[in-house]
Image (cartoon, rainbow, N blue to C red):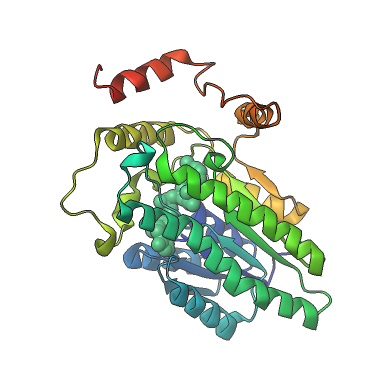
Amino acid sequence: MKTLQGRTLVVTGAASGFGLETARIAARQGMNVVMADVQAEALELAAREVAGLGAPVLAHRLDVSKAAEVEALGAATLARFGAPHVVFNNAGVGAGGLIWEHSVKDWEWVVGVNLMGVAHGVRVFTPMMLEAARRDAAYEGHIVNTASMAGLVCAPNMGAYNVTKHAVVALSETLYQDLALVTQQVTCSVLCPYFVPTGIHESHRNRPVELRDAAAAPTPSQLIAQAMSSKAVASGKVTAAQVAQFVFDAVAARRFYVYSHPNALAPVQTRLDDIVQRRNPSDPFATRPEVGERLRAALRGDA
Ligand SMILES: NC(=O)c1ccc[n+]([C@@H]2O[C@H](COP(=O)([O-])OP(=O)(O)OC[C@H]3O[C@@H](n4cnc5c(N)ncnc54)[C@H](O)[C@@H]3O)[C@@H](O)[C@H]2O)c1
């Protein structure tokens, strides 16, 4: 994309983390900013701050897992700013633990937000962007979907999160190929961050009441996953602001895969080698056996 000035960004999960940092950069670049999030109060605060940077801002509360609410976001965006130029389907939630211990509500929540949220964003905004491209040969559009390194490897005890993030990588690669069949003016990227300090380890804060398991306490594996992810996220050295800048760099360069930690891709190569060489999945703790030992001991109740 040649310029961001005067163009429109739509970002979901805009009240915190990568979404908020992206909105801040967009505002500084002179974009119109549509900020969407499920947390009304946090969204209001974030939108006020971004508007304070001088950007025209549309703040829209929604739950991205709900088809009609993403459709309403699309209609509101179109009415205020016309077809957007950058759409960042970024809202997501974390939930781990042994894969068979998720409740039905766990699956509905995590798949609903992480996968269906992205699917709805693509379903609602892509036709709008293609229509804008048909009308204007100078129009450029770019969709960015947030997956994770968890979409490229399968670390154990990360449950449904891994499943949804692999699905977002597949959705995004398919979107890339499908767009290339019909246009040169709209393309897409997938963001695959490693651990970065944000609010992701406190995702339960935005879990809807109807998808909570009021009666069931978290299982030991879920508590272990929560503790490990909190520690890993808190100790991340790359900042959310840097990741947001990587997103805009990728948009400018029309680069598909966006990483926060490009030096941490060796496990992806190992996984691909396992697949192609028909080996069973490699030990994810091969380079740090003490971490695997600690996890095994904790899960078996020996720690
Ligand atoms: N931080 C990391 O280490 C990391 C690593 C890999 C991937 N990710 C992904 O990055 C994305 C952004 O997360 P973050 O790290 O900035 O976390 P964050 O918790 O700081 O921000 C996520 C935002 O999404 C919003 N949200 C949650 N459910 C929603 C819903 N149903 N509808 C609309 N908004 C909703 C939250 O209210 C929050 O403001 C997520 O998809 C996450 O899975 C994060």
141 versus 298 height, above or below: below
**Residue 57, horizontal then vertical, whole percent:** 51, 73
Q: Residue at x 46, y 59 (%)?
A: 13
52 versus 247 height, above or below: below
In this view, the residue farthest toward the front is: 278
The number of discs equals 0
76 versus 272 height, above or below: below
**Residue 15, horizontal then vertical, whole percent:** 42, 60
The foreground one among 250 and 144 is 144
Asked which quadrant contains residue 274, the reply is: top right
Asked which quadrant contains residue 69, the reply is: bottom left
In this rendering, would 209 be left or right of 62? left
The foreground one among 219 and 94 is 219
In this rendering, would 255 be left or right of 213? right
Asked which quadrant contains residue 271, the reply is: top right
245 versus 237 height, above or below: below
Residue 170 visible, this angle = yes
The C terminus - image quarter: top left
Q: Residue at x 31, y 41 (%)?
A: 101
In this view, the residue farthest toward the left is: 215
The foreground one among 264 and 241 is 264
**Residue 200, horizontal then vertical, whole percent:** 40, 46
**Residue 278, horizontal then vertical, whole percent:** 66, 27
Q: Residue at x 58, y 61 (%)?
A: 88
In this rendering, would 117 be left or right of 42? right
